[in-house]
């Protein structure tokens, strides 16, 4: 079994703490993604698993074995990096076999492993080629193959797709996802790209400034972010935020901000009442902003006039960039939208999907329908 | 007497040969001369008062065989046993010399040996260049000087890096570091492409050593050079110092990414701390974060406000406060530079 367990792990460089009190259990065969902006501590955490960095305090287990003092080469892990280097004068076969030769594996064992990995990666026909005769995607597969032949308990992947062009990245994402199902091995995957995180992970750990912000399934992170950072980081285009004061007028709650007047979804009343008279941050995803005429008719309490700055046609949909009270918003609407740049346009916020955040703590006020994972 | 042929193109060859002869004499109690002192250059006959039977010997020196001649003086009996004993003595003495790292060059000069001597004797660039020329060590094409520092050392590091850079003409091991000269591929293009290649070297070497050997390597890459390998080595060595002080969390450092760190290298930390305190000391956590984001977003009010989840007016207010408390206006270049440098120093030191 290859579960990983972090107990109160801290990492400091001299006096600077880069990972704070990291507690996490990664399940056997789970594909877990560490995501966050540059400098958040995700790569440092990965390197602590690998043994390339010592923990300042805390414990890390692979299975039931405490690995803090186990040498990196004895941890039964394999790493895949964004910058992979293939030995230029060796064939693909020799590249994949080299690490096993260094580990003094028997020749027939090396041969079996290399051929099996080549079959999994669909590169059997490339085994005699040199790296310079390979495409970018083929080289990436050889780099993966070098890790697969080690038959590790855990794969550690540090932004392996970052150096690829957009098209190849999409292709390799699918390849890696297929691969993990075939290999049935625990994978810890680091990326700064939330799209990669959302499409690949069983669970995602969102990190910021050395702290875990939230650990959850992709859909829970998307629909039930625990704070503004997670809400703004997950999802593309990012969630829109708007500050408004909650008031009551004739028994009806309203969010007001200058000319803006929006009614919260009726079912949120109980959660919002403690904030009466206070400022709240409203988060609304681009796809929850509509300009469909029938929707506008149904929800006048959520409808407003906005000034359109830019319209981006993407083919299947349009992105509308508009301004409300000096704040910039993005809406994702149908390709048939009639919005025009530099014109006033009517949109409605679907307040049933809005999320509310405390101004002081930036934490979510209410998570309707949330069910914790694992 | 042994005539000792030395193979390198060293001006002090005669001195070195005399030193060897003296040491052999001290070690064995027998008398040795350098061949040129006692053999005629014309017909290789003995000159001076020495007479006796010659016994030819051959000593493996590096990749070469050196011919020695021992002349039995006077009426000392010499035969096959004497020859075998003398041969074993010469071989063992050479081996013993090598083990004791005597300063006797018994092989051709290599770049690695030249660098090692330069480091030990603290040569300057002029001395190094002159020595390299006299040793006929030339012909290095453009390339990157690269220093790989390993957290733990294994001889397999050499194996891995030799296979990664089979064309590297220089591979020098210093304790737990390895210095390489990585030739530039002509297809690397202009300066931007070269620097991208140099940056990639750091990641690739780090990744390979981490994955293949489980060794944490920090990689330092100097500016592209041609022939100036000693200057290249000194540059990457300086990068290790900068890395230790300002970039400790990174995988390595390339010379072109040092930025303003080089300005602070000679600054005592207390001076740096004083600079930070005077520039930023009056700012609370919220204003520091506001300033950091504002400069990170290239002084864009719109992008900064969005990142901070605050209104533009709120941001403007905070920037006014920063101006008031620091004396520097972050919206003007002059002020932004001062504040940026203080923030940079603060985040790259403790």
Image (tube, coloured by chain):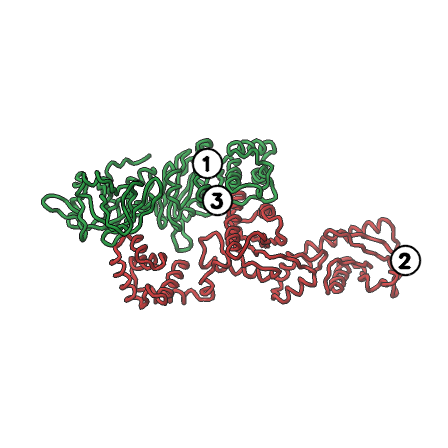
Q: Is residue B109 left or right of residue B280?
A: right
Tell me the quarter of the image containing the C terminus of chain A: top left
- Identify the secondary structure beneath mark 1: helix
> x%, y% of residue A367?
24, 40
Q: Which residue is mark 1?
A: A175
Q: Which residue is mark 2?
A: B75
Secondary structure beneath dot 2 equals loop
Residue B116 x, y percent position in the rendering = 63, 59
Residue, x 34% and y 58% (percent of image)? Answer: B292
* Mark 1 or mark 3, earlier in chain: 3
Q: Position of residue B13 (x, y in %)?
A: 74, 63
The circle drawn on residue B58 is: none
Quarter-wise, where is residue A269 in the image?
Answer: top left
The picture places residue B121, in percent across and down from the top left corner, at 62, 64
In this rendering, the label closer to the viewer, 1 or 3: 1
Q: Above or below — where is A277 with respect to B20?
A: above
How far, Cα to Cα, is label 1 from label 3? Answer: 16 Å
The residue wearing badge 3 is A81
Q: Note whether residue A198 is visible.
A: yes
Using the rendered image of the protein, determine whether residue B119 is visible from the camera's viewpoint: no
Crowding near the residue tagged with mark 2, few <14, some 14–19, many ≥20 C-alpha atoms within 10 Å: few
- Given the image, what chain letter belongs to the residue carrying mark 1? A
Give the residue displayed 36% in from the left and 50% down from the top: A209
Which colour denotes chain B? red
Do the CB atoms of the residues marked 1 and 3 lie less than 8 Å apart? no
Judging from the image, what is the letter of the chain drawn in green?
A
Q: Nearer the viewer, mark 2 or mark 1?
A: 1
């Amino acid at each position: 079994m290859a579960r990983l367990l972090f107990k109160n792990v801290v990492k400091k460089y001299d006096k600077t703490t880069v990972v704070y009190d990291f507690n996490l259990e990664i399940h056997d065969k789970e594909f877990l993604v560490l995501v966050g902006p540059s400098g958040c501590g995700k790569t440092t955490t990965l390197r602590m698993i690998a043994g390339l960095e010592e923990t300042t305090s805390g414990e890390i287990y692979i299975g039931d074995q405490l690995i803090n003092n186990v040498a990196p080469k004895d941890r039964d892990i394999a790493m895949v990096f964004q910058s992979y280097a293939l030995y230029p004068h060796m064939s693909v076969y020799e590249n994949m076999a080299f690490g096993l030769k260094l580990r003094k594996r028997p020749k027939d064992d090396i041969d079996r492993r290399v051929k099996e990995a080549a079959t999994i990666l669909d590169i059997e026909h490339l085994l005699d080629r040199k790296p310079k005769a390979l495409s970018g995607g083929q080289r990436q597969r050889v780099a993966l193959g070098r890790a697969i032949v080690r038959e590790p308990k855990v794969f550690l992947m540090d932004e392996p797709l970052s150096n690829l062009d957009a098209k190849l990245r999409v292709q390799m994402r699918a390849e890696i996802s297929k691969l993990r199902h075939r290999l049935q091995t625990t994978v810890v995957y680091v990326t700064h790209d939330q799209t990669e995180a959302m499409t690949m992970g069983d669970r995602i750990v969102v990190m910021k400034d050395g702290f875990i912000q939230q650990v959850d399934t992709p859909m829970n992170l998307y629909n039930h972010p625990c704070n503004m950072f997670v809400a703004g980081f997950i999802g593309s285009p990012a969630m829109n935020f708007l500050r408004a004061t909650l008031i009551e007028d004739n028994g009806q709650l309203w969010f007001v901000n200058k000319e803006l007047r929006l009614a919260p979804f009726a079912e949120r009343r109980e959660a919002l009442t403690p904030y009466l008279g206070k400022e709240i941050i409203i988060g609304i995803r681009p796809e929850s902003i509509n300009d469909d005429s029938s929707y506008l008719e149904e929800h006048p309490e959520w409808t407003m006039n906005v000034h359109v700055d830019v319209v981006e046609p993407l083919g299947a949909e349009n992105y509308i960039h508009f301004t409300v009270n000096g704040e910039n918003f993005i809406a994702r609407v149908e390709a048939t939208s009639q919005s025009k740049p530099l014109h006033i346009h009517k949109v409605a916020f679907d307040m049933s999907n809005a999320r509310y955040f405390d101004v002081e703590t930036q934490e979510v006020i209410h998570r309707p329908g949330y069910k914790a994972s694992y | 007497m042994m005539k000792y042929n030395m193979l390198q193109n060293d001006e002090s060859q005669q001195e070195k040969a005399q030193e060897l002869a003296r040491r052999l004499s001290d070690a064995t109690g027998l008398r040795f001369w350098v061949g040129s002192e006692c053999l005629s250059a014309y017909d290789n006959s003995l000159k001076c008062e020495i007479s006796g039977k010659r016994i030819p010997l051959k000593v493996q020196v590096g990749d070469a065989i050196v011919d020695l001649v021992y002349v039995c003086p006077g009426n000392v009996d010499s035969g096959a046993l004497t020859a075998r004993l003398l041969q074993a003595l010469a071989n063992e003495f050479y081996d013993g010399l090598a083990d004791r790292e005597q300063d006797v060059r018994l092989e051709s000069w290599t770049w690695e040996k030249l660098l090692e001597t330069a480091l030990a004797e603290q040569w300057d660039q002029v001395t190094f260049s002159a020595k390299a020329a006299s040793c006929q060590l030339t012909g290095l094409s453009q390339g990157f000087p690269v220093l790989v520092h390993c957290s733990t050392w294994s001889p397999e590091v050499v194996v891995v890096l030799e296979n990664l850079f089979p064309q590297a003409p220089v591979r020098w091991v210093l304790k737990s570091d390895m210095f390489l000269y990585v030739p530039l591929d002509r297809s690397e293009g202009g300066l931007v492409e070269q620097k991208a290649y140099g940056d990639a070297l750091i990641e690739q070497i780090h990744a390979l050593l981490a994955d293949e050997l489980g060794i944490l390597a920090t990689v330092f890459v100097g500016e592209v050079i041609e022939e100036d390998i000693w200057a290249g080595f000194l540059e990457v060595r300086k990068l290790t110092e900068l890395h230790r002080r300002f970039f400790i969390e990174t995988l390595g450092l390339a010379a072109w990414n040092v930025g303003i760190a080089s300005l602070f290298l000679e600054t005592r930390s207390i001076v740096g701390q004083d600079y930070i305190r005077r520039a930023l000391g009056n700012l609370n956590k919220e204003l520091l974060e506001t300033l950091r984001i504002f400069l990170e977003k290239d002084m864009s009010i719109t992008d900064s406000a969005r990142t901070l989840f605050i209104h533009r007016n709120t941001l403007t207010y905070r920037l006014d406060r920063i101006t008031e408390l620091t004396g520097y206006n972050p919206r003007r270049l002059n002020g932004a530079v001062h504040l940026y440098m203080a923030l940079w120093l603060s985040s790259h030191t403790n």
